[in-house]
Image: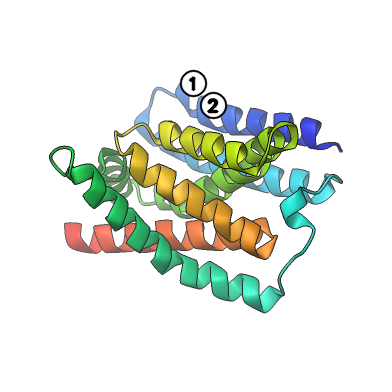
Amino acid sequence: MTLNRYSLLTIFCYGLAFFIPAFFADPNQAVLATTLSYLIGAVVMILLYVYQKEPLKIEKNTASKLSILIWGIVGIFIALILQNIAANIEGLFGELQPSQNTQNIITIILQRPIFAVAVMIGGPIMEEFVFRRALFGIIAKYSNYWIGLILSSLAFAFAHNDGHLLVYFFLGSFFLWLYTHTGKIWTSIITHVGMNTLVVIVQIALAQ
């Protein structure tokens, strides 16, 4: 499978996973549909990635499995620090606001705990394959690394749509750095999944 076809199929699956829940009017059914579509979407994207045969330039030299694991775990805490720095920079230009996206997610999880699976596992896996592998890959192929980084990170920021563009741009860029540094998308996936999981656990603990 070529990079072009892989990227289009991955982005299509991402859109499909997001639109399917819209067909369910009942909140409980919508949450269940979202959780299932995210998990199925993540599995499909993993399979697409495994069977595609056109590696990116950043995948030519790969780190060891141990390095990938270490960077993935350390990256969780670096990402949290970067998130805080970006949020404080945003605060210099206006009132520091909590993430409405995060608050909405936590509210849903408290009401319907199964949604946590989508947020902690399905969502971040899909986002890494879409924004870091498919979108960055196809843009960088026809331009260069930096244009790919900027546009894919901007797309990642706008996709979250809660006003914290700099926060998500910083995170998207850092996730791509992890991917570039180790040559494996699994590194940024470990960090993204770990970060989401830690944030959800902490937010739920604070809400109790």
Circle 2 sits in a helix, a strand or a loop, which is it?
A: helix
Q: Look at 69% across and 33% down and name the residue there.
A: 143
Q: Nearer the viewer, residue 171 or 73?
A: 171
Q: Tell me: 45 left or right of 84.
A: right
Tell which of 128 and 45 is nearer to you: 128
Amino acid type of the residue tagged 2 in the rendering: Ile
**At label 1, which amino acid type do we have?**
Phe
Judge the density around disc 2: few (<14), some (14-19), many (≥20) Cα neighbours within 10 Å: some
Q: Is 182 placed above or below 35 here?
A: below
**Residue contact between numbered discs 2 and 1, judged by CB atoms under 8 Å:** yes
Tell me residue 19's x, y (percent). Answer: 52, 25
Query: Can the viewer see residue 39?
Result: no
Query: Can residue 171 be seen?
Result: yes
Most extreme residue toward the left is 95
Give the residue at the far bottom of this rendering.
66
* Residue ID at (48%, 47%): 172
Residue 126 in the image, given as x and y percentages of width and height: 58, 44
On the rendered structure, is 124 left or right of 93?
A: right
Q: How is the image coloured?
A: rainbow
| Left-right relation of 136 to 24 | right
Q: Nearer the viewer, residue 53 or 39?
A: 53
Quadrant housing residue 185 = bottom right
Considering the image in quadrants, where does the N terminus appear?
A: top right
Quadrant of the image occupied by residue 62? bottom right
Residue carrying label 2: 20
Q: Residues within 10 Å of mark 1 (few under 14, many from 20)?
A: few
- Residue 193 point in image, percent of width and height: 49, 58
On screen, 1 above or below 51? above
* Quadrant the C terminus occupies: bottom left
Image point 24% across, 43% down: which residue? 90
Q: Please give the label number shown on residue 23.
A: 1
What is the distance, in whole Å, between disc 2 and disc 1 at their CAs? Answer: 6 Å
